[in-house]
Every structure is written in structure tokens, then in C-alpha cells.
Amino acid sequence: MREIVMDTETTGLDPNSGDRIVEIGAVELFNHMPTGKRYHQYINPERDMPEGAFAVHGLSAEFLSDKPLFNDVAQAFLDFVGDSKMVIHNAAFDMKFINAELKWVDRPELPWPQALDTLAIARKKFPGAQNSLDALCRRFGIKTERELHGALLDSEILAEVYLELIGGRQPDLVLSVVSNIDSKGSDMAVGWTPPQRPQPLPSRISDEEAEAHKEFVEKLGEAAVWARYK
């Protein structure tokens, strides 16, 4: 199963008010494991950078002035995402911007069900708690070592948080055994023994049934098979 963990940085909070995407970062997971494949792109928003947004990500209008326009990178972004599930923290925000940018350049919008919102997962798992990306990093002991937000860095951090949210580093943990085929063609698992129960299961046999079985075995004599398994 292929998933894309992604994040964006923008000039503000609302594309309908003229705000634009200035950075996209994404990392690929396959079966919940990082593959090392990434997508990262700075984008020229063709507008000024508000002080509030600059304080968050540190991307100035001057720095972005020679970067490609969204139209120039849209297809490469769509090709990287494909039809894979997009893992996003506060997906409504990023999807709103992505689809606005795609619409402005006459590209097909991405379907909302394709996004998986880790903020919604965190709120369900930790109701009433702080569930920002930074708060979840503190909860799971994930070191961020960052002063400013960055789309690629945040997507890498989110990938770690996502794996913790769905059950740790091995969410699809399956018992690993070495299998051999014996001479009769049956599959035998070797190199593994079942763990011992902390407390034995209670017997399903009543005292009356146990006593009746004992009397039955005694009548069979010492050669009875049951006598070997007292």
C-alpha cells in the first residue's frame, strides 16, 4: 500500500482571499515504511509575503521570486501523488489550497476522500488533548530540532507521528517465522515457540467429570493408554 505524507506552506490562511502555496513537501511510504522517495518544491506565489506567514516558515518574497510558478510544477506534483492516499495533518487546510491552485491552472482537483487527516485521528485517540504536530511530537518523544516550519521537514516529522498514531513503528506487525517443507509436504514453522501464558487457563472439566474419568481409566487396568498420561 502506497501512501504520501505531505505538507504545504502558504502566504496565509485562505486561498479565496488571495493566499497562495509557496512550498510543497511530501515523502512516500510503502506498507507504512519510508521508501526514501520525496517530492519538494518551492513555488513563486506572485505576491508579497505577509509578516505573519514569514514568521512561520521564513520564506521571503525575494527568495521565492525566481522559483517556478505552480502551473510549472503541477503535473510533476500530480504524478508523484498519483491515486495514493495523502496523509496530511489538518487535511482540510492543505486540500483547500491544493485544489484551489489546481483549479486556477485548469487541472483536475484531488478528491477529498483521498486525504487522510492525522489531526482527526489524533483527536479521536487523545480527546481533549493538544494535538498539534508539535504536541504530538512531544507526546511520542519525536525530536524535531527546528526553529521554522518547512513543508519537507514537517512531512518527514508527520510520517513518524503517523506511524505512532496507527500503532507504532510496525502497525501491520505480522508474526515472522521461518518455514520449511517436511518430507510429507506439510508446512512447518521453525525457530519460534509460542509464549507461555502468565496464568494458566482454568480447567473446563468439572470435579465430577474428572472423578468419573479417573474411575473409568482404573477399570481399564495398568496397560490402558490413559495410564501413561497421568
Image (cartoon, rainbow, N blue to C red):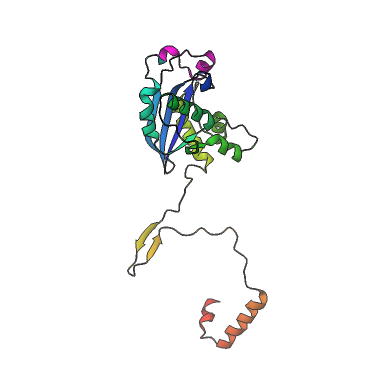
The residue under the point 63% across, 34% down is: 129
Report how many numbered discs are placed on residues in the image.
0
Q: Is residue 223 magenta?
A: no
Image: magenta residue range: 43-63
**53 in magenta:** yes
Instruction: Give x and y (percent) for residue 30.
Output: 40, 41
Q: Residue 48, how many percent across, how many down?
A: 47, 12
Q: Nearer the viewer, residue 79 or 109?
A: 109
Query: In the rendering, at what x and y percent does residue 8 appear?
Result: 47, 26
Within the image, what quadrant is residue 139 found in?
top right
Residue 18 vs 208, above or below: the answer is above
Q: Quadrant of residue 128?
A: top right
* Figure quadrant of the N terminus: top left
Residue 26 point in image, percent of width and height:
42, 31
Work out whether 214 lies above or below 139: below
Q: Is residue 108 left or right of residue 168?
A: left
Q: Which residue is depicted at the point 53% across and 86% down?
A: 222
Quadrant including the C terminus: bottom right
Q: Viewer-proximal residue, 26 or 171?
A: 26
Horizontal relation, residue 67 to residue 212: left or right: left
Name which residue lies at 39% across and 63% down.
188
The answer to whether residue 18 is above or below residue 24 is above
Q: Residue furthest right?
A: 208
Q: Is residue 90 visible from the viewing direction of this image?
A: no
* Residue 193 makes an appearance in the image: yes
Residue found farthest to the left: 183
Q: As drawn, is 159 to the left or to the right of 183?
A: right
